[in-house]
Image (cartoon, helix red, strand yellow):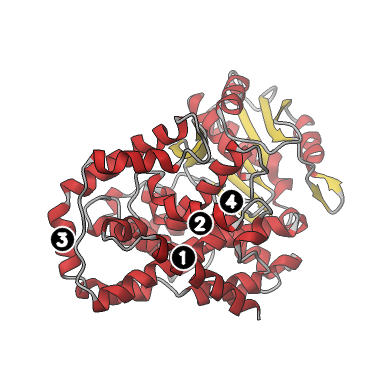
Amino acid sequence: MNSFASITDPTDLSGLRAVIANSPGAQTLVHLGIRRLEISPLAADSAVEAVEAELVIAGHPRDGAKVLIIVDSTMIRRAGQDLKAEIHRQLAARFDVDVLVLGNDAHLLADDNSLDSATKAVQNIDCVVTIGSGTITDIGKVATHRNSGTPLVVIQTSASVDGFTDNVSVVLKNGVKRTIPSRWPDVVLADTDTIADAPPAMNTAGFGEVLSLYTAPADWQLASLCGLDLTFHTTPRDLLLAFAGDPSKWALGLSGGHDAAIQQLTRVLAIRGMGTGVAGTTACLSGVEHVVSHMLDMYSGSHSLPTGLHGAQVGVASLVAAAAWHMFLDRMETQQPEAAFPGDPDVEVKVRSAFDWCDPSGATGAECWRDYQEKLAGWRSNSRQVTSVLANWTDHAEGFRALVPTPDTLARGLNAAGATALPHQLSDWITPQVWKWAVSNCHFMRNRLTVIDLLFFMGWWTDDDIDLVIEDAARAAQAASA
């Protein structure tokens, strides 16, 4: 029985903390540091109350307190009203308020410029309030973390990612997306009326993000079996799965902004963020499907193309992840493979050249090689353990088959949500060639073992193999929508 079965409300933070504290090996987990999580139709209206409470906890005087609102330039409306302006009005009636607007009409990135601007603006501020997207939230978390943990209230107005409730931030480093430690927000106010009013693509992207619940934990456990990830723990996995449910059922009506679907999406995304934070690693929810999405972002960034919605890309790539896993599981039933443990010179050129297509300067390839080189060294140093795992795969096969659904199952969920399921539906620039490049080389971009690394080291990641995986994912998507 799942240890979190008694918790039905993800905003019951004290209940979640109690279950986590009583779980085996709890001392290796990270304390759940969010003090308040509200998921409700008018959660944003609690902003003044939340700021006052945080000022008291931090020992700052409420009268004359300096509050900084961090936003981007995107208009956010709730019931036709400018939500940012309304929150500003409410806060300004009580505090000394400044506003930092980051970016312009272009897509905001959590790059050095944005992070440094926010960090400077937070100096001498008593409390920070972010309003908007996951990127704005990530910037707020980094900026307040750099300023000795200035109190942070997050007002969540979309449900496209899970970064509102975790303790890390996704930033750009040398054109490559990297996840860095930051901090837990103190308060998260998830305003579901505003989320329901968001463009449908935002919420269906959030559903795509949810699907990594069903693929990434397998990559995480595989890396642990092979000795390359010592963070694997069943408690965060159980926390995530306790609230996942059957997405093909609860996602119905999501693209239309139906209340029940929006509420459940927001709840599951909140649990995802807290689960990764407690685990102390994003590996529990970031496997093959995420690196494929990151590859697309790298390509679009280097070609000055519009950056796609991360969650939408993750949703489509989750079909690839499931297809890769099932190809591996099927072959392991009939073949006796041997894994290779190559030296750096055998792989370095391949890794670096894989990124020439999106950055001829070599900077991106060099950044990815630095990360991949560490993974390759770990792979070699654990050769004996890897060999033993493969030789005794029948001990693990049933558990992984139960953990990873088929591409067809995930595709039915995407269809129910009204979400994108095929690469070319994501953006016009994602041609079959770009998609195959992203899938083919995704394992080269970072230091995290996935099933595609295993396929590569076993000689099962040839052009023909890659085509089979891509075709299986596409077939599932087409069948679900037929």
- Residue 310: give its label: 4
Please say whether residue 244 is visible from this viewpoint: no
| Tag 1: amino acid | Asp
Give the CA distance from mark 1 to mark 4: 23 Å
Question: What secondary structure is marked by label 2?
Answer: helix
Q: How crowded is mark 4: few (under 14 residues within 10 Å), some or many (20 or more)?
A: many
Tag in front: 1 or 4: 1
From the image, tell me which residue sits under label 3: 387
Measured in 3D between alpha carbons, the distance from the residue under mark 1 to the one under mark 2, in whole angstroms, is 8 Å
Disc 3 crowd rating (10 Å Cα; few below 14, some 14-19, many 20+) is: some
* Residue 6 vs residue 431, the one in the foreground: 431
**Res. 300 in view:** yes
Q: Name the residue under label 1.
A: 467
Nearer to us: label 3 or label 4: 3
Q: Quadrant of residue 373?
A: top left
The residue at which mark 2 appears reads as 436
Tell me the element at label 3: helix
Q: Which of marks 1 and 4 is nearer the N terminus?
A: 4
User: Hey, what amino acid is under mark 2?
Assistant: Lys
Q: Earlier in the sequence, mark 1 or mark 2?
A: 2
Callout 1–callout 4 Cβ contact below 8 Å: no
Amino acid at circle 3:
Thr
Q: Do the residues labelled 1 and 2 touch (CB within 8 Å)?
A: yes
